[in-house]
Each structure stands twice: as structure tokens, then as C-alpha cells.
């Protein structure tokens, strides 16, 4: 027998597709008891807001005459109570990624509907109180977040969805250089509290990744965006470690001591990583990277608990950074 959620969706689909459906037809299609079907129809009306009416002349159930579309449902999906709680928690996660409430404003109608549905699972004020309590029990901490001005987020996302090109004035921080360029947006990426845009850059005729917080000006153009196959985007932009993309792929070999191995063995540093336990209780991790900038920063956070074994150029990069950091503190004090 279908789940309650799937059954409710099936009832709505049958009525929408056929215009009207008799009680017997619904029983035969759903393979449920009359009592169950009656409860489902009442749930759809009272809790989901579905404008289902019984038409005596047609001897069947249909949507009301004023019905003009699926306004009573969350787009394309039905949710049971447990799924609604999960969705509400996901909404809180999304809201926590926002810089100045942009996503929260766009999600507000959905959040209001979720609250209504959650409250209907209880009784009156008790149901609403339960929904409010849940909101207080979800906390998202975003450290080192780089906010994005809402006007840029809106323009970038609008161009992405409309498949239009963007004209950007962009600050390349590493070179402290501001440039003007037209790009064709391919996808938005959220990584470690920061939003990025993967786009085809028409100035260099290649895929590039742009940090949204480094955009100084953005204009949506009328010209259609160049379409790049998503498989190509993923292959070129996701091969390396972290947010850095492009370039020849190399493999880092790391050894975590026995203490750090308890955590490192459970962490995903990269989807393509390979790990194995060593006889002395340490843990060896192999992972691909194309640019060592972010990898070196993450390795420095591990301190003395990790050793880079290969390749030699990564070993040297970490050694130089550690030596430079130690030099800032001078010689160790006597005693």
C-alpha cells in the first residue's frame, strides 16, 4: 500500500487529470478502505487547503469552480508531518546562509505555509506553539562568513535562471586587480559561508569561478548565455581541492597521527579521496588538488598532528608557511 503522502498526491493527481473522479474509482485506484479514503479527502480539504468538492450531478469529486491551479499545495510535492519538520529545518539552514535577509524574504511565503501546515498537525495554538519551539531548537553557526550584497545576489541568480549573460566589474584579490568582463552563468556554489558563481568568461574563453562578495558591479544583459554541459562544468570545476579549480591535478599524501586519525578517518576532505589505516595507528589520506592555496591553509590548522608526505612541492609549501609563522614569534624564551 502506498504511503500516506504518496496517496494524497495520487488523489490530487487523479482529480486534476480527469476533471472528476467517483468515490468507487478512487477506492479501486488507491486500494484502500472507504474509511481511509474519507479521512484522506477530509485531510486534503481541511489541512492542505485543497478545494475538493463532491458534485452530485457528476457523482464524483472535482476541484471547485474557482480553482485556477495548484495554489493549495507546495509546488509539485506533498509532505507528511515528519517531512514538514525536516523542510522547516532546511529552511533555517538556508536562512542562515543569507547575507542580509534576501533568501529569507524569498522563502517567507513558503515558511508561512509550512507554519500553517505544522500548526494544523496539532490543535490550534498548541500546533503553532510546537512550530515556534522547533524554530528555536535549530541553530546554525556560520564562522568567517563573507556577506554578499543582496542586489548582486539577485542579479546573478536572475541571470542564471533566465539564462542571460552578466557584465561584471570584478576584483581579483590575489592580484588586487579590478577588471570588466562578460560571463555566462552556469551554476551557483555555496562553500564555507561564501557564495560563488561558476561561469563561462567570454574574455578568456574558459570556465572561471567568481566570489560574489568580490563583485563590484553586476548588470544582466539581454544576450543569451552560452550553454556549457554540466558534466563539463563539474569535471573542470570540481576536480581540485576546495574552491580552487583549473590546472593540472596532483595528489597529496597526508599522514595523521594516532590521535588526529580518530577524526580524520571520518572526514571528507574531497569526494575522490582515498584513505587507509597504518600499522602504527596513524591514518594515511590521499586526495586530489589543483592549487595548494586552500589545502595548505587547512593543513596548517592541523598543526603537528599531520605530516605531508607527498608531493615534494606541497611539502615545501607547508614547510615555508610554518617557518614564516614561527619566525613571527622569534626565539623561544629561556626556561
Image: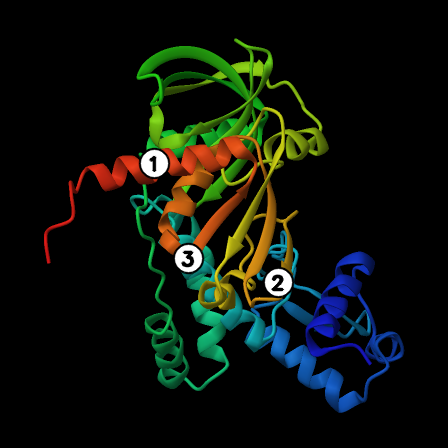
Identify which residue is drawn at 31% across, 34% down: 149
Looking at the picture, how far across and down is residue 99, in whole percent? 32, 44
Residue drawn at (45%, 53%), measured in percent from left and top?
306
Q: Tell which of 264 and 124 is nearer to you.
A: 264
Answer left or right for 230 relative to 318: right
Q: Which residue is mark 3?
A: 305
Disc number lying in front (1 or 2): 2
Mark 2 = which residue? 278
Query: Which image quarter holds the N terminus?
Result: bottom right
- As measured in the structure, the alpha-carbon distance from the residue carrying label 1 to the one carrying label 2 is 27 Å
Quadrant assignment for the C terminus:
bottom left
Using the numbered discs, state the Cα–Cα distance from disc 1 to disc 3 in whole angstroms: 16 Å
> Regarding mark 2 in the picture, which secondary structure is present there?
loop
**Mark 2 crowdedness (10 Å alpha carbons): few <14, some 14-19, many ≥20:** few
Query: Do tag 1 and tag 3 residues touch (Cβ < 8 Å)?
Result: no
Q: Which residue is mark 1?
A: 321
Comparing 258 with 48, the one in front is 258
Say whether disc 3 or disc 2 marks the residue closer to the N-terminus: 2
Q: Are marks 1 and 2 in contact (CB under 8 Å)?
A: no
Q: Residues within 10 Å of mark 3 (few under 14, many from 20)?
A: some
Q: Quadrant of residue 233?
A: top right
Residue extending farthest left = 334
**Dot 1: element:** helix
* Residue 275, placed above or below residue 241: below
Do we see residue 244 in this rendering? no
- Tell which circle, 1 or 3, labels the residue nearer the N-terminal end: 3
Q: Is residue 107 above or below residue 261?
A: above
Where residue 123 sits, quadrant-wise, is bottom left
N-terminal label among 1 and 2: 2
Residue 105, image x, y percentages: 36, 48
Cα gap from disc 3 to disc 2, whole angstroms: 15 Å
Amino acid at each position: 500500500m502506498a504511503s500516506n503522502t504518496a496517496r494524497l498526491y495520487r488523489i490530487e493527481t487523479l482529480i486534476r487529470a480527469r476533471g472528476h473522479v467517483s468515490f468507487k474509482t478512487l477506492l479501486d485506484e488507491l486500494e484502500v478502505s472507504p474509511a481511509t479514503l474519507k479521512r484522506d479527502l477530509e485531510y486534503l480539504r481541511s489541512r492542505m487547503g485543497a478545494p475538493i468538492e463532491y458534485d452530485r450531478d457528476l457523482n464524483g469529486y472535482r476541484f471547485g469552480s474557482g480553482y485556477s491551479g495548484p495554489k493549495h499545495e507546495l509546488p509539485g510535492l506533498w509532505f507528511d508531518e515528519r517531512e514538514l519538520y525536516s523542510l522547516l529545518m532546511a529552511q533555517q539552514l538556508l536562512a542562515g546562509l543569507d547575507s542580509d535577509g534576501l533568501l529569507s524574504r524569498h522563502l517567507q511565503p513558503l515558511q508561512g505555509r509550512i507554519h500553517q501546515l505544522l500548526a494544523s498537525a496539532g490543535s490550534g495554538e498548541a500546533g503553532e506553539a510546537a512550530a515556534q519551539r522547533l524554530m528555536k531548537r535549530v541553530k546554525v553557526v556560520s564562522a568567517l562568513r563573507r556577506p554578499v550584497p543582496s542586489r548582486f545576489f539577485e542579479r546573478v541568480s536572475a541571470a542564471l535562471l533566465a539564462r542571460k549573460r552578466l557584465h561584471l566589474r570584478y576584483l581579483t584579490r590575489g592580484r588586487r586587480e579590478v577588471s570588466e568582463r562578460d560571463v555566462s552563468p552556469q551554476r551557483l556554489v555555496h562553500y564555507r559561508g561564501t557564495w560563488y558563481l561558476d561561469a563561462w568568461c567570454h574574455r578568456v574563453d574558459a570556465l572561471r569561478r567568481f566570489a560574489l562578495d568580490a563583485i563590484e558591479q553586476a548588470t544582466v544583459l539581454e544576450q543569451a548565455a552560452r550553454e556549457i554541459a554540466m558534466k563539463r562544468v563539474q569535471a573542470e570545476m570540481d576536480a581540485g581541492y576546495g574552491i580552487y579549480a583549473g590546472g593540472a591535478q596532483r595528489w597529496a599524501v597526508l599522514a595523521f597521527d594516532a590521535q588526529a586519525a580518530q577524526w580524520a578517518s571520518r572526514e571528507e576532505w574531497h569526494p575522490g579521496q582515498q584513505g587507509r589505516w597504518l600499522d602504527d595507528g596513524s591514518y594515511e589520506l590521499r586526495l586530489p588538488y589543483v592549487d595548494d592555496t586552500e589545502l595548505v591553509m587547512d593543513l596548517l590548522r592541523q598543526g603537528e598532528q599531520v605530516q605531508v608526505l607527498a608531493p615534494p612541492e606541497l611539502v615545501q609549501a607547508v614547510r615555508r608557511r610554518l617557518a614564516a609563522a614561527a619566525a613571527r614569534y622569534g626565539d623561544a624564551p629561556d626556561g
